[in-house]
Image (cartoon, rainbow, N blue to C red):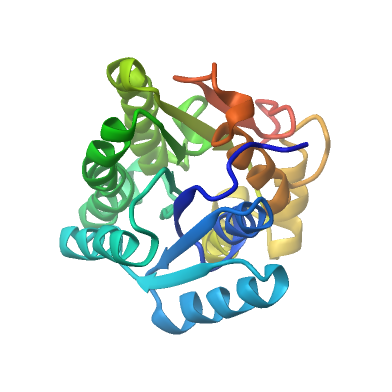
Amino acid sequence: MDLGIKGRRAIVTGGGSGIGFETARQFLEEGVRVLIAGRTADKINKARDELAKRTGGEVHAVQADMSKEADIKRMIDTAKEKLGGVDILVNNAGTMYSGRFASLKDDELKNQFETKLFGFMRAIRLVHPMMKAQKWGRIVNTIGGAGKEPDPYMFGSAMTNSALLNLTKSLSEEFGEDNVLVNAICPGWVATDLWVRNAEGLKKELNVKSEDEAKKLAARKNSLGRMGKPEELANATVFLCSERASYITGVSLNLDGGRLKGLW
């Protein structure tokens, strides 16, 4: 299927691994010119080299921490320099802290807000004028299922993600007249580095001894009985950025394997 985005220019944040890496790969295979961004220079540069090797496409990389306003501006400036502009923005970078209300520290919550809520907003603010001027743009926010159905130990993520759900819907209405479409994907548990980083907190909350046990319990939280794969999330993201999705905006798409409640 031709997605009609060959030659378009895309930024993918959190592009060094997981969902972001797979999204960038699929864009490149569709002929999209891509800039990936990530917090760690070595990691994002290695991802760039791997993507170029695997796809033969045009891919650039920039070190950028989405919690820092200056880094976001530098990321957009790099896209202008390397790509000549931005047609597609995938806000995929994020953090997640596991723990109940009493254990969540203020600085952890602030970091979540800075990285995801304010980070996403700042990036959108800088790319929107380009998209508006050309009467074409696609913005996809990777939010997380906790924004819709929070669990007790996901308090911080629930707050951040619920704000992003409303941001997505509000901007879709404001930007629609200029053919700038704003959507979101809401992943369930996906086998990525983010899962590994939070496994310790989840093990404690779920009262299990190993990461494998935590994974098995997480898999029970959906109808398919397994964790998601990064490429499955990327499939939806790339589609939402395509001409095939030209009548879709303001949607927050659940990608959670049929999430179930009350299993732990």
Residue 255 placement (x, y as % from top left): 65, 34
Q: Going by the image, does 65 lie left or right of 182?
A: left
In depth, the one of 95 and 17 nearer the eye is 17
Q: Residue at x 47, y 20 (%)?
A: 249
Residue 228 placement (x, y as % from top left): 72, 46
Q: Going by the image, does 113 lie left or right of 61?
A: left
Could you tell me if residue 203 is visible in this image? no
- Quarter of the image for the N terminus: give it: top right
Could you tell me if residue 166 is visible in this image? yes
Q: Quadrant of residue 24?
A: bottom right
Q: Going by the image, does 90 lie left or right of 115?
A: right
Q: Residue at x 36, y 42 (%)?
A: 156
* Total numbered badges shown on the rendered structure: 0
Q: Going by the image, does 107 lie left or right of 139?
A: left
- Quarter of the image for the C terminus: give it: top right
Residue 59 placement (x, y as % from top left): 52, 68
Above or below 211: residue 102? above
Q: Residue at x 55, y 81 (%)?
A: 46
Residue 209 placement (x, y as % from top left): 68, 64
Q: Residue at x 62, y 58 (%)?
A: 28
In depth, the one of 243 and 199 nearer the eye is 243
In depth, the one of 174 and 105 nearer the eye is 174
